[in-house]
Amino acid sequence: MTARRSRLAKGSGALVGVLVALALGAAAASGDTTGPPVSTAGPILKGSPGVGKKMQVTNGSWSTSATFSYQWVRCAATYQACSMIPGATAATYIPVAADVGHVLEARVTATNAAGSASVLSSGKGPVEAKPPGVTHRPWIRGTTKVWETVSETDTRWTRDPYMFRDRWLRCSARGDACVRIRGGRQCANGFCVPENGAGSDYTLTPRDVGHRLRVQAMAWNGAGHTISTSAPTQIIRK
C-alpha cells in the first residue's frame, strides 16, 4: 500500500519517499545491512578426500558482508564423533594419514561489526590413502552375435569406490590392438541401435564383426581411480 501511495502522491515529498525506498533496497541487495551475519546458503567442500589431495571449502552465502575464518573437522564415517583438526584453520586442507576412514567437514565463521555466526559445510569422505584395488576383474556376459547385447559383470573392488564407469573396446581378431568405441548409430536391414561405448551394456553392431571386445571397468575413491580390463570375447559373428 505504501508504494501505491508514493506513486499517486504529488510534489517533492513523494519523490523523496521513492528515493529513500530505492536507497534502502540497494543497501540490502549489496549486503550492507545491520546485525550479525546470517547464512543463506551453506559452504561446500571441493576436491577429492584422499591423502595428499588438496581440498577447499567455499564461504557459502551470507546476509551481510563479512570476514571469514575456518576450522576443519574430522568425523566418523557416520558423521558423528567429530573433533577439530589442530592447525587446520585455512580455507584449504590436505588430508593426512590420520584422516583415513573419516569424513571431513569445515566450519566457516562469518564476522562483522555486529557479531559472528558459524555453519558447517557439506561433508566428504571417507578419506582413502590409495585408489580402489581389484579383487576380480570384469568379464563379459552374453552372446557374441550382431544385435545381441553383452554386459560387463562381476568386477570386485576394495577400498570402497564411490563412482564407477565402463568403457568398451573394439579389438583385433587376436584380442589386442584395441580402440575405444565411441558414440554413433549403426543400422542394418532397417534396424538401428546407438553405438554407445559407455555403460555396463553394449549392443553388438555390424562394425564389430570379425573383432573381439574387451571392457574396462573404472572405479574412483577419494585417492584416485583404478582401471580393470576384461579378457577378450570370442570373435563377433553375424
Image (cartoon, rainbow, N blue to C red):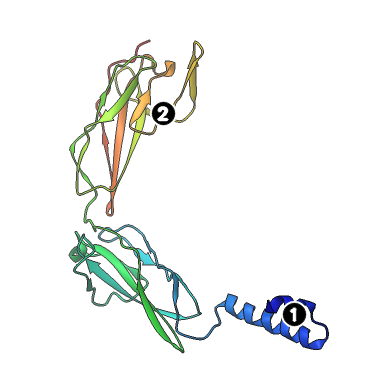
Q: Amino acid at mark 2?
A: Ile
**Where is 101 relative to 43, above or below?**
above
Q: Residue at x 29, y 36 (%)?
A: 217
Q: Amino acid at mark 1?
A: Ser
Please give the label number shown on residue 6.
1
Q: CA distance from mark 2 to mark 1?
A: 67 Å
Task: Give whichever of 61, 186 is nearer the camera.
Answer: 61
**Left or right: 52 as drawn, with respect to 81:** right
| Residue 213, x across and y down, in percent | 32, 23
**Left or right: 31 as drawn, with respect to 153:** right
| Residue 142, x across and y down, in percent | 28, 20
Task: Give whichever of 152, 122 is nearer the camera.
Answer: 122
| Residue 71, x across and y down, in percent | 31, 75
**Left or right: 157 as drawn, with respect to 168:** left
Report the residue marked by disc 2. 181
Q: Nearer the viewer, mark 2 or mark 1?
A: 1
**Where is 46 relative to 33, above or below?**
above
Query: Label 1 crowding class (10 Å Cα cut-off): few <14, some 14-19, many 20+?
Result: some
* SS at mark 2 in the image: loop
Q: Quadrant of residue 79?
A: bottom left
Q: Residue at x 39, y 18 (%)?
A: 208
Q: Residue at x 49, y 24 (%)?
A: 185
Q: Quadrant of residue 116?
A: bottom left
**Where is 71 relative to 49, above or below?**
below
**Which residue, as the protein is rendered here, is positioned at the far front?**
1
Label 2 close to label 1 by CB (< 8 Å)? no
> Of the residues under marks 2 and 1, which one precedes in the sequence?
1
